[in-house]
Image (cartoon, rainbow, N blue to C red):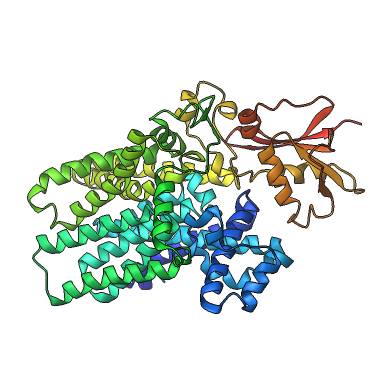
């Protein structure tokens, strides 16, 4: 075996990535249901109905099926700008939503994890393009894998985490194109870019940055030829074709579609809800978030060592540009670092200056971590080169041990707080919050911990008549309305949702985030029977009505 891996070192790296993939896939079912899952599945089905109308006609069996269940076309909804092409492979399983919805959720989480791991693998390949060894590249890829929030949301956040992965794939395929400009590589780059842009229109900017970098790189190296020109033209045409094929929402009215998409990309017109930030509640139309909100969230929700490596990578990238200023566009490493910087700095800078509607926390800017993760890996590579050149033996061993300790600490935290790693805030983030973290920052936005809380509460309940459950706030109640329709076997038949005007349900579910957002006091006559915690913070509490 050792001889095989010595002869085929890439197989060892592939085996490590496969092990990471299988480990996450094995626990995908533990994340259960999240509040937006059914609406996201509905958006996928609305896109499928749009395809059916255009390809089979309104009298087709597929369209009649969707009409029977009351599902509109995507162009008849406000979600017309919500691309979801990354989940088209689940189309054959969509009828399960009407017969056995609980069986569809693990498939959804599994495919989401596949996309996340595709991003991790793309990051590994980008690390190799930076000149990193296979071991160092694996360590660079684990910066993303072992970030607690990304590990958790990589199992179910089908919009933001998938967009992050698609950005990394677009970056990788763009680099491969400028390495060898062929029509085949251009088509793959175009497909990745089209998937990225369909998921969120900002993906078009990532595709544009990498495409422009390829053009400048070929020009600087004087590598233009007839085949390179053919590849460039073919790439643009393939992108337009793929984007059109993946986006049925634009087929009926392309101009109106793009107008709607760009308006909502810069200011989300159908959202003006509240955000809990540093102990205060912000509403964009009344009290907009401060300009430092996004960088603050980035700094406090990532492990400290990841942030430090990203900062070091950015600083050393600037040094690399200065050193290679005459060959900036012809040097592939310098150009990749420049592209990564533009991909994170430009949209983040725009958001800080223009202060658009940043809804649902900083997660809608997860895509900027595509560029930051490359820079973080470069920071790691710079440290490796520094200690290899200037460090003594014990210093090299100490640095390697410290790096291993950082990764091991993240891994241990993920293990101990499974499956609620999404509530992670680093130590400085907890210190900087003027209120206790449970009262000052959002923890369980997706209401993922509710099922665990209900399972804990029912463990102490004798078998008998079903219990009614209710909530203090409308969001948690909405989550309960979804969950009681698709409960796991351990809960099915034992719970029912209390009427909205019911004064005293048997069980009262309290999501601490929404309790503070809505200022909902706990009524008298209840006793706490269950609690879900993560990283030392309380996410959800379940109360039992006293006899």
- Is 460 positioned to the left or the right of 218 in the image? right
Quadrant containing the N terminus is bottom left
Please provide percent x and percent y for residue 153. 53, 50
Of 76 and 504, the residue lying toward us? 76
Residue at image position (48%, 48%) is 150
Please provide percent x and percent y for residue 429. 47, 29
Count the numbered circles shown.
0
> In the image as oriented, which residue stretches furthest toward the top?
434
Quadrant containing the C terminus is top right
- Is 336 positioned to the left or the right of 219 in the image? right
Q: Give the image quarter of residue 52.
A: bottom right
- Is 108 positioned to the left or the right of 508 in the image? left
| Residue 199 visible in rendering | yes
Please provide percent x and percent y for residue 160. 47, 51
440 vs 501: above or below: above
Of 253 and 481, the residue lying toward us? 253
Please provide percent x and percent y for residue 366. 43, 46
Q: Give the image quarter of residue 437.
A: top right
| Residue 109 visible in rendering | no
Residue at image position (88%, 48%) is 466
427 vs 326: above or below: above
Residue at image position (36%, 57%) is 168
């Amino acid at each position: 075996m050792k001889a095989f891996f010595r002869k085929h070192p890439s197989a060892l790296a592939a085996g490590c990535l496969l092990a990471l993939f299988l480990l996450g896939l094995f626990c995908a079912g533990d994340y259960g249901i999240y509040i937006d899952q059914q609406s996201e599945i509905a958006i996928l089905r609305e896109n499928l109905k749009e395809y059916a109308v255009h390809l089979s006609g309104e009298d087709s069996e597929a369209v009649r099926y969707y009409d029977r269940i009351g599902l509109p076309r995507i162009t008849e909804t406000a979600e017309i700008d919500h691309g979801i092409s990354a989940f088209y492979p689940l189309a054959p399983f969509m009828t399960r939503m009407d017969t056995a919805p609980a069986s569809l959720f693990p498939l959804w989480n599994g495919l989401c994890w596949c996309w996340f791991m595709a991003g991790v693998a793309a990051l590994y390949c980008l690390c190799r393009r930076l000149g990193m060894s296979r071991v160092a590249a694996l360590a660079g890829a684990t910066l993303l894998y072992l970030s607690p929030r990304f590990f958790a949301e990589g199992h179910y956040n089908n919009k933001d985490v998938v967009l992050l992965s698609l950005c990394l794939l677009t970056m990788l395929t763009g680099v491969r194109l400028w390495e060898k400009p062929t029509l085949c590589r251009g088509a793959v780059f175009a497909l990745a870019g089209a998937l990225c842009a369909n998921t969120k229109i900002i993906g078009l900017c990532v595709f544009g940055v990498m495409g422009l970098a390829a053009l400048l790189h070929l020009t600087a190296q004087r590598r233009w030829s007839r085949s390179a020109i053919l590849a460039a033209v073919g790439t643009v045409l393939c992108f337009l074709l793929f984007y059109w094929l993946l986006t049925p929402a634009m087929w009926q009215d392309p101009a109106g579609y793009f107008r709607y998409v760009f308006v909502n990309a810069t200011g989300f017109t159908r959202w003006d809800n509240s955000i809990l930030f540093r102990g205060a509640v912000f509403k964009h139309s009344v009290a907009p978030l401060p300009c430092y909100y996004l960088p603050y969230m980035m700094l406090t929700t990532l492990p400290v060592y990841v942030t430090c490596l990203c900062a070091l990578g950015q600083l050393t990238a600037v040094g690399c540009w200065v050193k290679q200023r005459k060959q900036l566009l012809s040097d592939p490493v310098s150009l990749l670092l420049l592209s990564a910087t533009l991909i994170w700095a430009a949209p983040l800078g725009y958001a800080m200056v223009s202060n658009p509607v940043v809804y649902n926390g900083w997660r809608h800017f997860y895509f900027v971590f595509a560029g930051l993760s490359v820079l973080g890996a470069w920071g790691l590579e710079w440290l490796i080169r520094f200690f290899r050149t200037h460090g003594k033996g014990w210093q090299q061993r100490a640095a390697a041990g410290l790096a291993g300790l950082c990764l091991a600490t993240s891994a241990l935290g993920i293990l101990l707080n499974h499956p609620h790693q999404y509530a992670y805030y680093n130590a400085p983030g907890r210190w900087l919050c003027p209120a206790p973290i449970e009262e000052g920052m959002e923890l369980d936005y997706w209401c993922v911990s509710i099922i665990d809380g209900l399972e804990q509460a029912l463990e102490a309940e004798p078998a008998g008549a079903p219990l009614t459950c209710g909530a203090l706030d409308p969001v948690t109640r909405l989550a309960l309305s979804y969950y009681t329709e698709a409960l796991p076997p351990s809960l099915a038949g034992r719970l029912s949702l209390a009427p909205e005007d019911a004064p005293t349900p048997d069980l009262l579910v309290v999501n601490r985030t929404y309790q503070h957002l809505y200022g909902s006091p706990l009524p008298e006559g209840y006793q706490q029977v269950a609690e879900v915690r993560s990283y030392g913070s309380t996410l959800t509490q379940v109360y039992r009505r006293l006899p």
